[in-house]
Amino acid sequence: MPRGTESALAGYLGLHGDGIDEAVTRQEVTTYFDTPEQDLSRHGATLRVRRTESGRVQTLKMRSEGSPAFARGEWEWTLGSDNPEPERLASTPLVSILGGLGQLEPVFTTDVRRTTRTFQLDGALIEAAIDLGSVRAGSAAEEICELELELKGGKVAQLYKLAATLRAELPLTLGAESKADRGWRLRTGHPRAPEKSVEIALAPDVTSSEAIRRILNGTLANLMANLPAAVAGQAAGVHNMRIAIRRLRAALALFHQHLAGSTEARLTAELRRLGRVLGEARDWDVFCTETLPKAAEDGVAKPLLEIMRVRAGAARADAHSGLSAELAGSALTALVLDLAAWAEDPAALAGSPDGGALHTPLKTLAPALEARLERKARRRGKHIRQRSEEELHSLRKALKRLRYGIEFLAPLHHTKRVNAYLKGCKALQEHLGVINDAAVAVSLAERLSAKEPSLTLVTAALKAWTDHRGNEARQHLRKAWRTFKEASLPT
């Protein structure tokens, strides 16, 4: 949060909620530990020893799969010194790596003045902490000015409600980097590595509302995990954020008929808008790092491509600049908080006090949910050889929604049947992707040549090359489409 906001924030928290204690301020010096090989970090774990005037505490934090988007598992032990005691980790999920764990060493330190206050809000017990100070790794340092909200008891939805209220009142944005992430960035010079999505575990008897909660939470966590890399301009971070947005839209499309219509429409529209901003940066990334080099390999005149590469690089920089401004704004924070809060409230999800059909087991709804997405894809693919580029793009999007929907519900089905079905989806999608990439490449080249007529010749050469690639892909469509149609949904 911006410096100077802390006073307004402290006053706001003092006026809202039923305070059960007075604000407490203390100095905290926290040292984070890992091995030279970063064994803990590679397993998604953070180990620290915090020193205050009242003593020393060792804490392990790990993200728990399926938990709320910003929740992490946490284990604490009181220590008698500043040195960590790794043997304590035997009672945690890290027990499996203890035997091969190298020597722990300090990697970075935070020194903050923390002011905390615990209060009740609509039945929830919440601790608010304002941290002011710095994080230091060697000679590199960065200021800390942030608010942490921690649920001590009650419903998670109330925590998100408070966060949303604070965001509306004050210039606050979600921090995608923990103090540990910031420390590692200062130490290594690199932000948190981009992360691909992982399968979301669903129990066979999971209710539909719980399934949506886990799907949205897991995908939101993946979205935010890639934010630092995207802000840093890393193509993989942008790509993964874009995929997370698509997966969120696919989740809403999967359960569409059972969700509160107005809320789902509003959130889908905002996801679509953010997706377009990410898509602009991603399109230029692909054009500069994949399309132009590949065209050069295939014989398109390199001198001409070099001129276009310089102009495209400038356009790419502009797209990333616009994306950075978007990601630093309040819209992303509002969207994530809205989705996270919605996921925690079955009545709000369904738009009905009893949760509607979402209170039933997911395995009851799953066949109809999957069949609906498949029907949409099949309709868009009829007479596939005669479809225009726009129509094929619509089919590609429908296939992605179907594929993501099947992946979300994969734990309910036999793995081999899921993999066999998805294989057909991916094969068809790959050919459609080549056709779409060709169309996007021409569109971007034409945008450049419209501003600089000297690029007309290379645009024509690039169009001839992409037309050839697109036509080759079209030759495979009928067979891929037939394979897809003949496959049966997994059971």
Image (tube, grey):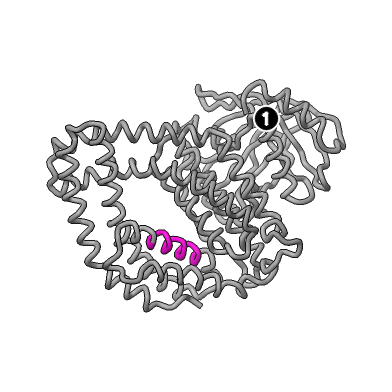
> In the image, is residue 172 above or below residue 396?
above
Give the image quarter of residue 368. bottom right
On whether residue 398 falls in the magenta region, the answer is yes
Residue appearing at x 63%, y 54% in the figure: 262
Front position in the image: 395 or 262: 262
Q: Is residue 281 left or right of residue 146?
A: left
Give the image quarter of residue 256. bottom right
Look at the image and tell me in which quarter the N terminus lies.
top right
**Which class describes the residues within 10 Å of circle 1: few (<14), some (14-19), or many (20+)?**
some
Residue 441: percent from left, percent from top: 27, 46
Residue at image mark 1: 170
What SS does tag 1 mark?
A: loop
Q: Is residue 477 left or right of residue 146?
A: left
Front position in the image: 175 or 477: 477
Front position in the image: 45 or 155: 155
Front position in the image: 15 or 57: 15
User: In this rendering, does residue 33 appear at all?
Assistant: no
Q: What residue type is labelled 1?
A: Leu
In the image, the segment drawn in magenta is 395-407
Give the image quarter of residue 11. top right
Residue 397: percent from left, percent from top: 41, 59
> In the image, is residue 414 above or below residue 391?
below
Residue appearing at x 76%, y 61% in the figure: 353
Residue appearing at x 32%, y 45% in the figure: 286
Residue 243: percent from left, percent from top: 45, 51
- Per the picture, the main secondary structure of the magenta-coloured stretch is helix
Residue 147: percent from left, percent from top: 68, 33
Q: In this view, does 421 lie to the left or right of 345?
A: left
